[in-house]
Structure formats: structure tokens, C-alpha cells
Image (cartoon, helix red, strand yellow):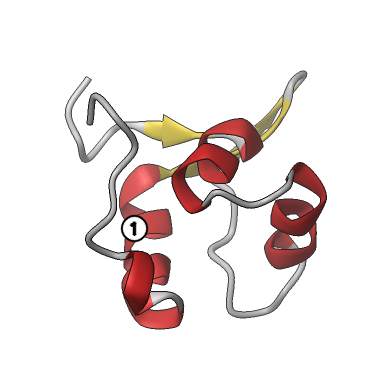
Amino acid sequence: MTEQQRLMGVKEIQQRLHLSRQRIQQLAEQPDFPAPCDALAMGRVWLARDIEAWIRIYRPEQAGMREPGR
């Protein structure tokens, strides 16, 4: 899967931002947060590129940080 196609669920966003699951759910309800690209049985999923773009704008101090192995 290319970076353009990579998906992130709440768990991946949580790991990326080092925030609680509850905080990610709160952020996902904000109008500036990217819209999910789909909803699966496990929950909503987002394109990683959309999440990374949001991080660059709204959490620039975390933009250079990556989860281990990425």
C-alpha cells in the first residue's frame, strides 16, 4: 500500500499523536478535522495523508514526529 493509500483508524491516530482514544474521538468531531474516508465495523478510517496534513496545520510541533517504524 502506498503512502497515498494508507489508512488510519482511531488507534493509529492515537499512537501518532500520543493522545488518549477519547481525545482523538473529540478531535474527530471538530469541524477542522478531516472527514473519514469510510466507516468500517471497527470504526471510522481516514486517509493518512489527510491526517498528516491536519497535523502540519493544527499541531505543527508534532509534524516531524513519526511513529516508530514509519
According to the picture, the residue beneath numbered tag 1 turns out to be 52
How many residues crowd mark 1 within 10 Å: few (<14), some (14–19), many (20+)?
A: many
Residue shown at the point (64%, 39%) measured from the top left? 10
Outermost residue to the left = 2
In-image side of 23 versus 53 (left or right) = right
Residue shown at the point (64%, 52%) measured from the top left? 19
In-image side of 18 versus 61 (left or right) = right
- Give the image location of residue 34, x and y in percent: 53, 64
Q: How many labels does the image show?
A: 1
In the picture, residue 61 is in which quadrant?
bottom left
In-image side of 64 versus 52 (left or right) = left
Going by the numbered disc 1, the residue's amino acid type is: Glu
Residue shown at the point (58%, 59%) measured from the top left? 35
Where does the C terminus fall, quadrant-wise? top left
Residue shown at the point (82%, 50%) measured from the top left? 22
Of helix, strand and loop, which one carries label 1? helix
Residue 22 vertical position relative to residue 26 in the rendered view, above or below: above
Residue 1 vertical position relative to residue 16 in the rendered view, above or below: above
- Give the image location of residue 23, x and y in percent: 76, 58
Where does the N terminus fall, quadrant-wise? top left
- Give the image location of residue 29, x and y in percent: 77, 66
- Give the image location of residue 43, x and y in percent: 74, 31
